[in-house]
Amino acid sequence: MPAVVLSAATLGIDAYLVHVEVDTDRQLPSFTVVGLPDSAVRESKERVMAALRNAGYEWPRRRVTVNLAPADIRKEGSAFDLPIAVGILAASGQVRAPRLADFALLGELSLDGALRPVHGVLSAALGLRTHRIHGLIAPQANAREAALARGPLVYGVSTLVQAVDVLEGDCRLPPFAADLEALFPPDPQCEADFAEVCGQEHAKRALEVAAAGGHSLLLCGPPGSGKTLLARRLPSILPALSPEEALEATRIYSAAGLLPADQPLVVTRPFRAPHHTISDAGLIGGGACPRPGEISLAHHGVLFLDELPEFKRPVLEALRQPLEDHSITIARAAFSLSYPARFMLVGAMNPCPCGFLGDSRHPCSCSPTLIRRYRSRLSGPLLDRLDLHVEVPALSYAHLAAGQGGEPSAQIRQRVESARQRQRARFAGQPGCFCNAQLRPRQLRACCALTGKGEELLRSATTRLGLSGRAHDRILKVARTIADLEGVEDLQAQHLSEAIQYRAFDRRQ
């Protein structure tokens, strides 16, 4: 009689239930896996056969057929080794597991019967919460990660024999428990601190505004002015991850196979800095075996693109939709999936190909045509979607020789967290909106009402600079953040004035 073992698989970062059906009949010995398996699943025969024999069980001298249902979705990875092995044991009568339907199984088998960790366990545990499943049997190395979902009881086992004992009730293994809050450090420390940065007070202020409102920004300046130095210190002033945000980020890293073995939870905001040779699929996700891209790996964190004009034009244009929708949808002929992409984009670039345009100490060697061609690599629609354009001038010798930094990141973070608290209170009860950068048009009108003087200032700037409607809204959002940093509710002219000066590329038109 066929045996049915429950398991789970991920499509993108979402999980779905898989029924592993195993049948043995009296025909010539063979092993067949159906249900759109990939190479790793098809090769499970050799791993399962060796694991069963080395664990003291027998390989049935029959035809073994394994069906992975639903059969119309491609199955990937080695996590089906354990449910296939248990299904073969149950179908051949070597184990009696009356509670088999109450458990889901995941795990890769080594040749000696030990269990190795697999990817996507957190997504699987979260997906199983909607099904009436008592427990999840997973490799011991994945137990802490799976327990974070607070779904089915998680039993971390190290061998195939131990998994069978749990199913038969012969092993009194307690379910694994994980305290989500205990995994967060009491006082998170960053190696990079703003106290190490000399000068550049204007750029530091812009980064503070960006952090307080979750805004994207572009840093433009000559080589060595400190653009990368500043960008890499942005995470040190961002608010700490909430437990919900940490779970979302961990789910992505788990599905991508990038979660460290000794760290079951992402507890600090991600900072991703891909090289400018990255492909479209590497940035937005996808590929033959769909995986999250860099914009999803930066979810709830920072995506830093250094030397922004050097990125391929299609790669940069692919950022436009995620910046607006905070998600990326990948549609193929056989499937369609979505990845979250709520990130802060920070770009850095030189003002011209040689890098010294506007530098009084180094003459620029670029022709107007070269400069225009260099800047045209960034399209107008993409620049429109960047909230702040900040010029970072070269430092003088006096600043470098003094060696005096500014405020430490901890002090700046206090102001940022205070501004974020005001925003959370303002947006309470409005799902999908957590900071000013995510304001929708209707919310924008309600939260950014202008006085007569402020309205006249914005009208003048919009007319003189030829701002688009999107740039107009960006200015209002940034001004709202500046007011929140000051702790005031009403937008005033000085808030708008500061927000307008952060549109450096618009002023050059």
Image (cartoon, rainbow, N blue to C red):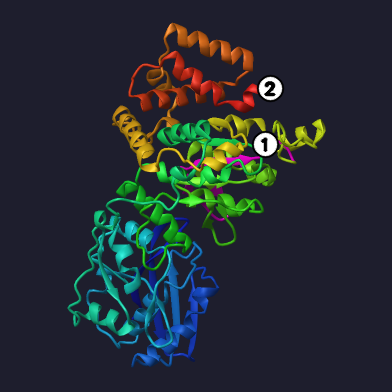
User: CA–CA distance between discs 1 and 2?
Assistant: 14 Å
> Is residue 300 shown to the viewer in this render?
no
- Figure check: 113 above or below 376: below
| Amino acid type shown at disc 1 | Leu
Q: Quadrant of residue 401?
A: top right
Mark 1 or mark 2, which has the lower sequence index? 1
**Does residue 352 belong to the magenta stretch?**
yes
* x then y, percent, for residue 313: 69, 43
* x then y, percent, for residue 493: 45, 13
Residue under circle 1? Answer: 378
Is disc 1 surrounded by few (<14), some (14 to 19) or many (20+) residues within 10 Å? some
Q: Tag 1's secondary structure? A: loop
**Quadrant containing the C terminus in the rendered view:** top right
The residue shown at (61%, 32%) is 383
The residue shown at (52%, 46%) is 303
Nearer to me, 130 or 274: 274
Q: Is residue 112 left or right of residue 99?
A: right
- Figure check: 422 above or below 157: above
Q: Tag 2's secondary structure? A: loop
**Quadrant containing the N terminus in the rendered view:** bottom left
> Is residue 264 shown to the viewer in this render?
yes
Q: Quadrant of residue 107?
A: bottom left
Residue under circle 2? Answer: 509
Nearer to me, 374 or 442: 374
Span colored in magenta: 330-353
Is disc 2 surrounded by few (<14), some (14 to 19) or many (20+) residues within 10 Å? few
Q: Quadrant of residue 15?
A: bottom left
